[in-house]
Image (spheres, rainbow, N blue to C red):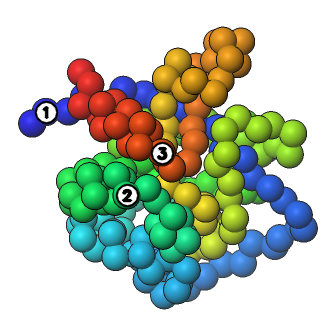
Amino acid sequence: MSIKYKYFTFFLLFYFLTPLSIKPSEKNIYELISQDKNLSIFFNYLKNTGLDVVLKQKSPWNWTIFAPSNEAFKTVPKKLKNEILSNDFLSQNLLMDHILAKYKTSEEIEEFSKEVTISNKSIELYNSSDLFVKDMIVTEKDLIAEDGVVHVVNCIMFVQPSIQDSRLDKEVAKKFPITSCCMRKDNEVILWLSNLYKK
């Protein structure tokens, strides 16, 4: 089945409580994720969907991965677990929303940065303590590998057009046409599936 992806953006908050010096690593991004106990569930999904093979290979670009923690997977709604995470094709598409084919540390994001995920969704990253559009939070930033960087997030990300989100008023939806949230409700699972198959 041919699927045409539409471009989406999400607003991602980085919270910086203390300065952090970024240290280089001799591990590649596959090894870094596989050896992180807090990312063991995410790593298993990478293997199940074949994305681990992609990350193992040497490529001309580096990676930036917003990796959901184990806690993120443990708190997903049953509908997400049963209808998306139990299906390798759908899981692959969902995880691809979390990956950039580009190296992007927190130090390289000043106030705003627009990127594109490997699922061909446009995303907007914000590094601002006073911006709060939805509830996406990086809980651990700048896990550096020799071929990329991992930022740990506290939930499974859902990127959506603002008009689909009843929690946003018209003024906010107009200003930010695409927003993101944590996929924690059944209707968000339904919307993600609907958006995936939309032509």
Q: Nearer the viewer, residue 156 or 148?
A: 156
Q: Nearer the viewer, mark 3 or mark 1?
A: 3
Tell me the tag on residue 19: none
Confirm whether residue 55 shows in the render: yes
Upstream in sequence: badge 3 or badge 1: 1
Q: Say left or right for 26 vs 79.
A: right
Q: Which residue is mark 3?
A: 185
Upstream in sequence: badge 1 or badge 2: 1
Circle 2: is it few (<14), some (14-19), or many (20+) Cα within 10 Å?
Answer: some
Q: In terms of secondary structure, where does tag 2 sit?
A: helix
Q: CA distance from mark 1 to mark 2?
A: 27 Å
Q: Which residue is mark 2?
A: 78
* Residue at 42% from the left image edge and 28% from the top image edge: 7
* Residue at 63% from the left image edge and 27% from the top image edge: 167
Confirm whether residue 120 shows in the render: no
Question: At label 1, which amino acid type do we have?
Answer: Ser
Total of numbered circles in the picture? 3
Question: At label 2, which amino acid type do we have?
Answer: Lys
Q: Is residue 145 above or below residue 54?
A: below
Question: At label 3, which amino acid type do we have?
Answer: Lys
Q: In terms of secondary structure, where does tag 3 sit?
A: loop
**Are the two marked residues, 3 and 2, in contact with CB atoms closer than 8 angstroms?**
no
Q: Which residue is mark 1?
A: 2
Coordinates of residue 165 in the picture (x, y in percent)? 55, 26
Coordinates of residue 38 in the picture (x, y in percent)? 55, 80
Q: Quadrant of residue 150?
A: bottom right
Quadrant that contains the N terminus: top left
Q: Is residue 116 above or below residue 177?
A: below
Coordinates of residue 95 in the picture (x, y in percent)? 38, 55
Q: CA distance from mark 3 to mark 2?
A: 9 Å
